[in-house]
Amino acid sequence: MSDNRGIYTEAEILSQPETWKETLQYLKSDWVSRLPNLQDYDQIVITGCGSTYYLSIWAARFLHCSTGVPAIALPSSELWYSGDVWLKPFKKILFIAISRSGQTTETLQALDQFLKKQKKDALAITCYKDSSLAKMAPLSITTTAGMEQSIAQTRSFSNMMWPIIFLSEKNIPDSLITTVHFSAQTFLSNYQAAAREIGRDLDIERFFFLGNGPLFGLAQEVMLKMKEMSLSYSEAFHFLEFRHGPMSMVNHQSLIIGFTNQATYSYELPVFNDMQKLGGRTLAVGKVSGKPQSIDYLFDVGEKVSPTWSYPFYLPLIQLLAYERSMAKGLNPDKPENLTAVVEL
């Protein structure tokens, strides 16, 4: 295996603090007065494929919780072949299509179906400004700082999260950009060594990712990263749902990674405790006070960035963990098995 394997993936994961700064500056300079007003709509429909479908799940839950506007996430294929079921003419819908490349066939078809219904309220989020999706959508936010050479999405995913947060918050203070940049650099520096060590531990055979609310979508995304990069057994669940059957798979070769939420932390902590009793190891990512005994490893996001703006922070260290596992297994995370960067049908 070439010594160059994984060089793009690693660089793209670690570059996220710098790319986030660039994306936030772009949004502040180009989009403050151009964003659609979410309160003008009866419903928000968000779509994507693969990683961007999981991004859509996070986005729909986040926007619904933060704005009160009903929001749903659907795979683009559902909207392509059964759009009439979901796109009702009596509702004023904001349609958000997300695609890293802007060339994914199902997402292009889903947007086309929406526009054919003479609905003009569509927004694309992509990393490539000259892509078909960017050209087709009436509005297109292009987070070019997230462009990648590797196949598995890492920095592209987190950079495409910022426009969704911005849709809710409508403003990006200069101080926020500085705080996000510095805090992200510090976060990666504080826990990078631990993430690499855990990723190299091949005694771990099963990975379970837990998250509530919007964080469930991010748990699904890192579940996918672990499968794509390292070909490992990996599943995602809501915290308390994990007790309803899936925990039967927990053993001494299991790592349970929980994306914690301050609002529901008192319900999440007992789940970590229960999984420890079953022999599993536990890793918490989020804003956690202290380090309870039921948490073996902790990646503390800290308090400097508000919960609303901290969602992208949950991803880089777990992406790095998946990268290290891939490398330890002799794989090439730049080129996951059986995958291509774009699915064109």
Image (cartoon, helix red, strand yellow):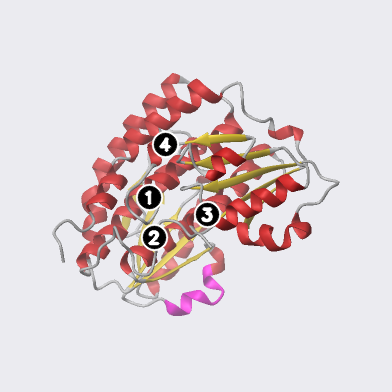
Q: Which mark is residue 340?
A: none
User: Circle 2: is it few (<14), some (14-19), or many (20+) Cα within 10 Å?
Assistant: many
Circle 4: residue type:
Thr
317 or 146: nearer the eye?
Answer: 146
Say which label, 1 or 3, has the lower sequence index: 3
Q: Residue drawn at (29%, 52%), measured in percent from left and top? A: 9
Q: Are marks 2 and 1 in contact (CB under 8 Å)?
A: yes
Task: Determine which residue is flagged by label 4.
Answer: 144
100 or 28: nearer the eye?
Answer: 100
Q: Which mark is residue 154?
A: 1
Q: Residue drawn at (43%, 25%), measured in percent from left and top? A: 25
Q: Which residues are magenta?
A: 242-249
Task: Determine which residue is flagged by label 2.
Answer: 225
Image x and y of residue 77, in percent: 62, 61
Which dot, 2 or 4, sits closer to the camera?
4
Image x and y of residue 106, in percent: 59, 58
Circle 1: residue type:
Thr
Image x and y of residue 122, in percent: 67, 40
At mark 4, the secondary structure is helix
- Quadrant for residue 84, please give it: bottom right
Circle 2: residue type:
Lys
